[in-house]
Amino acid sequence: MASRRVKLARVAAVLSIAACGAIGIYGAIIESLRNGFFDVIHNTVGGRAVPADRYIPGAPEPLKLSYTGVAPVDGYLLGMIGFFSPFLDGERTWDVDVSYWYIMVHLCAGWVLMSVEGMRKGNAGLAVSWTGVMGLIFQSVTYTVTVPVWLIMHLLTSPVAKGDPAAGAVDAADMALLPACAALAFIFPAIMMNLPSPSVLPAASHYGWIAFWNAFPLWQSIHHWVLRRLVAPSASAARMAAADVNQRPGVAAAAKPTPTARSVYKFILALCATSQLALLGLALTPYTAVPAGWAPGWTALFKQVDLSSAFVPTLPRGDVGAVGFASFGGRRVPGDFLPPLAKIFLQWDVYSANAAMLIWAVYVYGVSRSVWKAAGHITAQTSGLLVAVKSVGWFLVGGPVATATFLLWERDEAAVRVMTVVSTKKTR
């Protein structure tokens, strides 16, 4: 009976994750095909543009056209730059700026959480461990397409999703390095590409940083590979010493990584909570509360950012199909056209995929709890009601990725207790 419930829960989780992906595809991709967002990018800087006349509406000039010297790669990078530039350049409103920063932080958090999962020992050799490749794919095919596919693959192939407590073990050195690698690969380039141009950065450097950031999955893999080899000898020696002392390698393999994984979980929760609380505070503050002596820009900030503009994606509309590059009649597209459309795309893209991530984490936590309880391995377990209450709290404070992180943390801590119980039974 328990096995049947697990199978039904897996089917429900897969269908729910697929539904999140479908919603994201419609809200981000289909709507962008209809509202002119993709059309303008393709005709101003993408493949349909005349090479000598390429430009990005509202962005600094001259536009940098060569990045690698390889024409297909440079063409791809120009398209990606054309996509992200509306968030950084041109005539943007505060709701676009604030939403962009919030979404970027939660994109980073979701990416780091998936990186943790890819490094688990039970996933070694499986497709779900290739998170660097997956990251490069979602930078090209979109987050809302790639992430649900990866999550479904995980549910169907990973021993972690089948309740194997030992499969969740991670290497201590990997977890210690992951936040630094993410900061170097994702956060630092994101800050650099957001510096004002041309007032702070020349146009060429500005575009160079956007292109560089877009390959953050590759840079993170490289940073990790290099740093891992610098710390590997000492880390390996420490693990061997721990195994010799404990004389229980199985328990050491499962229990030792969990405390160090806490630092990664704390890193993710800090990213999610600080951004969510800041945006909530901003959205809930009425613009009438802004002191009269403050600059007009502050009033505009609080007036334009509310709960709806911050957290609710714009619903697809049926009256935008004729809008596109041709509607400008050969004139240059104004700098205020793309930013609101870019916001619509990114909200549907990231929100839908992160919702799928939460569903995945609920399933992984739930199936682990069910399997371990049925096997009689759980002696003391956190109340399901308490976990549910804490999950709601983390959702309000940090959003879907924070809640998913909390549930995986709970799962890891329970796995250590289960491995201890199993080891104790074997030694009796």
Image (cartoon, grey):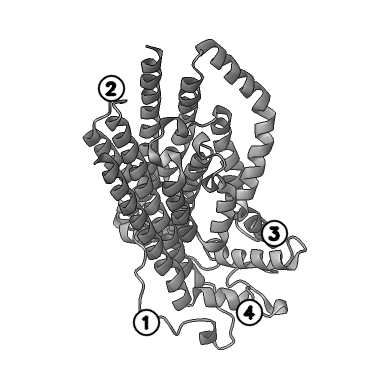
Q: Secondary structure at mark 2?
A: loop
- Residue tagged by mark 3? 202
Label 4 secondary element: loop
> Tag 3: residue type?
Pro
Q: Is residue 302 above or below residue 399?
A: below
The answer for how far apart the CA atoms under marks 2 and 1 are is 59 Å
Give how far across and how far down residue 298 sits, in percent: 41, 56
Kindly report which numbered mark, 1 or 4, lies closer to the viewer in this rendering: 4
Vertical order, 176 against 93 (above or below): above
Gap in angstroms between the C-alphas marked 3 and 4: 26 Å
On the rendered image, what quadrant is the C terminus found in?
top left
Q: Residue at x 69, y 59 (%)?
A: 202
- Give the Cα distance between marks 3 and 1: 39 Å
List the residue tagged with mark 4: 48
The disc placed on residue 379 is 2
Determine whether the residue tagged by mark 3 lies in a helix, strand or loop: loop
